[in-house]
Image (spheres, rainbow, N blue to C red):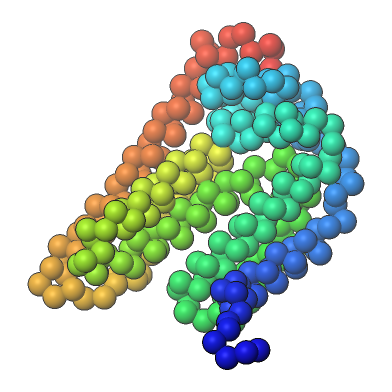
Amino acid sequence: MPSGQHLPRFFTRRGVHILGLALAVALAYGNILSNTFVWDDRDYLVNWQSVKSLDHIGELLGGDNPHAGSYRPLTSIYYALSVTAYGDNVFGYHCNKIALHILASILCYLIFLHLSKSTFLSLGGALFFALHPIHAEVVTSMTSAYDLSAVFLLGSVLLFFYFDGRQTLPRARWEARFWLTYLGSLALALLAYFSYELTLALPFLLASYVVLFPGRPSGDGDAAARRARYLLLVPYFLGVALSAKMLETSRHPLNRVGRRGET
């Protein structure tokens, strides 16, 4: 290569690892692309009338669901958008699932990289996540809610880690992008809460990180910085309370009237 020329930035070790992750997932799950509708796929994508038209978005936000006891409005809207885009074409649904799993695996890689600072350890951990057989049912099912919510949750965690890592830099606290990172984490957390209820554990995960990784000392302001880290977790817990309240409201008998007999 002539002097002064460089490879595109993507072709760094990190970029090659991310590309390898994507290829590994695509190869592992490429054989599912022609699988037909089975089990819950029929309940959510074939027989559920509310996802046949985007005119029912309001009902989906209100908690309309063919399976009683769950409040996952964003997942329901995702189904409606998918049905609008693909109809009965199973290929499109499976492509979505593989893409979501690739994205979740890349987010895992970046999280491991932030914690370990080792690209090889991060690649190993991400490959373990990406190819572990426990995820087979999640990826192969067209209506499993885990992968969409996992992308939101992992994205929220990663942005919080980036934000928290810059808190000890005084100049960073006055940068707009510093706080945009935090707000982005909060926004993804809310999307996760309203996609799948297991993500309500996110604030406790972040609190564990704050306790286990106290950060760099910042001189006289160290005690104040520690208190600030805990206070910044409060909105995540408030989001959990909001989600729980919305779930309670969606289960109220008056809100189930007129849902075309679905339970």
Q: Position of residue 62 (x, y in %)?
A: 53, 21
In the image: residue 167, left or right of residue 207? left
In the image: residue 161, left or right of residue 250? left
What is the number of callouts on the image?
0
Q: Position of residue 40 (x, y in %)?
A: 76, 35
Q: Quadrant of the N terminus?
A: bottom right
Task: Find residue 72 and report its image quarter.
Answer: top right
Q: Residue at x 46, y 46 (%)?
A: 188
| Image height of 43 relative to 29, above or below | above
In the image: residue 200, left or right of residue 28? left
Q: Position of residue 17 (x, y in %)?
A: 64, 74
Q: Residue at x 44, y 33 (%)?
A: 244
Q: Residue at x 57, y 68 (%)?
A: 109
| Image height of 94 relative to 26, above or below | above
| Image height of 114 relative to 3, above or below | above
Judge whether residue 46 can be spotted in this image: yes
Closest to the observer, 104 or 87 = 87
Q: Position of residue 115 (x, y in %)?
A: 45, 73
